[in-house]
Image: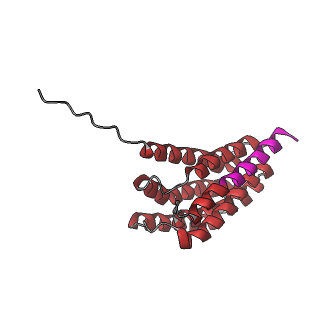
């Protein structure tokens, strides 16, 4: 087994491990996924897998595809267990994502395609960012930690580094890391105010 295969296998394993706690918390109604984000993520991760495969990065694509299948299941569960906290901002993001997807479908330039996928993924993440900022306990961050780690392993498994094979998975590492950091900060208890006794 080469080191590319080793990290590619780790990427798939971590992606699979990440799924159970999130699914459990959704069914227990502890986590309320945002249907807009998960819809776009499902579309992107499955199609990005095809783009990465065209670069002959099979092991990197395997990790992304695993997360794509997880996204599909979460999206389907969102119809029943998803958040009701959906704003105009979220809808604007969804429309923006689909406009970008329309452009992406008709482009034959692989590099431009991956850049568009990366931008669309970020736009799709914004409704979940907003929801988690307002309700930091409405997400199971273990999934996002595992997503960052899984995609990091995907980056390490790439046999030929280029914009096409690297940009999207590297952006997933960054956005998931920022998301987890934001949620952890929001969950920190506020400092107790110290009352100063009057003289």
Quarter of the image where one finds residue 80: bottom right
Residue lying at 55% horizontally and 48% vertically, measured from the top left: 175
Residue lying at 51% horizontally and 48% vertically, measured from the top left: 179
Q: Is residue 181 above or below residue 110?
A: above
Q: Is residue 178 magenta?
A: no
Residue 106: where, in percent of width, then height?
A: 63, 67
Out of 110 and 2, give the one closest to the viewer.
2
Q: Is residue 151 above or below residue 67?
A: above
Residue lying at 73% horizontally and 54% vertically, measured from the top left: 52
Left or right side of 77 for 128 = left
Q: How is the image coloured?
A: secondary structure
Out of 55 and 7, give the one closest to the viewer.
7
Q: Which quadrant holds the N terminus? A: top right
**Which segment is the magenta one?**
1-18
Residue 29: where, in percent of width, then height?
A: 53, 64
Residue 94: where, in percent of width, then height?
A: 49, 66
Residue 147 visible, this angle: yes
Residue lying at 61% horizontally and 65% vertically, measured from the top left: 74
């Amino acid at each position: 087994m080469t080191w590319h295969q080793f990290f590619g296998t780790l990427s798939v394993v971590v992606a699979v491990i990440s799924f159970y706690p999130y699914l459990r918390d959704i069914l227990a109604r502890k986590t309320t996924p945002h249907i807009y984000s998960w819809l776009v993520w499902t579309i992107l991760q499955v199609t990005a897998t095809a783009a990465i495969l065209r670069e002959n990065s099979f092991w990197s694509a395997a990790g992304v595809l695993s997360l794509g299948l997880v996204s599909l299941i979460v999206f389907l569960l969102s119809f029943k267990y998803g958040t009701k906290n959906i704003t105009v901002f979220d809808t604007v993001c969804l429309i923006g994502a689909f406009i970008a997807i329309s452009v992406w479908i008709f482009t034959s330039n692989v590099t431009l395609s991956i850049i568009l996928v990366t931008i669309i993924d970020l736009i799709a993440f914004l409704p979940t960012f907003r929801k988690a900022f307002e309700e930091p306990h409405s997400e199971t961050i273990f999934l996002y930690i595992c997503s960052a780690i899984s995609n990091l392993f995907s980056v390490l498994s790439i046999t030929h580094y280029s914009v096409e094979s690297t940009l999207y998975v590297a952006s997933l590492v960054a956005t998931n890391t920022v998301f987890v950091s934001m949620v952890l900060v929001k969950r920190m208890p506020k400092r107790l105010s110290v009352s100063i006794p009057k003289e």
